[in-house]
Image (cartoon, rainbow, N blue to C red):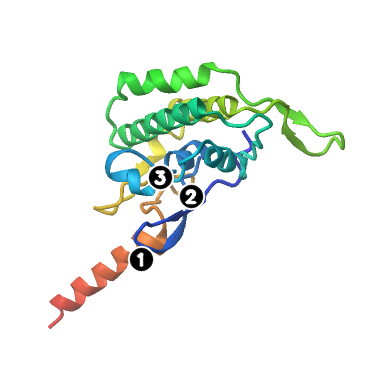
Amino acid sequence: MRANATGRVLHDPKGGSFRFDAGAVCLDFAHTGGEGRYAVFETLHEPADLGEWLAQPPLAAVMTVPVAARELTAAKTLRQAIWDAAHAQAARHPLPAGTVATINRAAAAAPLIPALAADGTTAGWAPPVRATQALSTLAREMIELLSGPLAERIRECASDNCPLVFVDTSRPGARRWCAMERCGNRHKLRALRARRATDP
């Protein structure tokens, strides 16, 4: 996967937005919405929404076959499994068996096939490009992440009320926050206020 530029802009339903880089495309995908209390963050309402998300870099998988409703359902199932697996790994808990099965099932489908363009210097995806292939590619990336050396770098934001998960790809491995301009700065402000409150 050409995952050299991960990260997306996330929008808060209460207003505001910020850039969040989860460090892996599959983890970026896990933050496109959710179930229960995360339903307010949903961005994949229609099959076309999924196609639009997949077409954005770095995956840049422009669908040549329209996304079907069943593929949107499968995408949300995979998204939840990636979310659950990432949180389990971040907490150093065993991955739920159902989560593993869902990721493996998605990965079993044929993935996107890279193809060199006629100019011999750029690449794309060989047609036909289907959503099921893109989901397989995302599932395979998650498998590589969970079974590789970066598995221990999967973390949840250190803020008490932020559930965002990411893989810390920084060299020192010291990333704590989803984004400095969001939870990192909030933490700094709280710490500053606490110090001022205790100053004589």
Question: Could you tell me which secondary element the residue under label 1 belongs to?
Answer: helix
Report the amino acid beneath label 1. Answer: Asn
Image location of residue 60, percent across then percent down: 64, 40
Q: CA distance from mark 3 to mark 1?
A: 26 Å
Question: Could you tell me which secondary element the residue under label 3 belongs to?
Answer: loop
Judge left or right: residue 47 versus residue 12.
right
Q: Residues within 10 Å of mark 1 (few under 14, many from 20)?
A: few
Report the amino acid beneath label 3. Answer: Glu
Judge left or right: residue 195 versus residue 75.
left
**Which is closer to the viewer, label 3 or label 1?**
3
Image location of residue 42, percent across then percent down: 40, 45
Name the residue rendered at 26%, 73% in the picture.
192
Report which residue position mark 2 lands on.
Answer: 21
Q: Is residue 109 above or below residue 189?
A: above
Report which residue position mark 1 lands on.
Answer: 185
Report the amino acid beneath label 2. Answer: Asp
Residue 42 numbered mark, or none: 3
| Picture mark count | 3
Res 116 → quadrant: top right
Comparing 51 with 178, the one in front is 51
Which label's residue is closer to the chain start, 2 or 1?
A: 2
Image location of residue 11, percent across then percent down: 43, 56
Which label's residue is closer to the chain start, 3 or 1?
A: 3
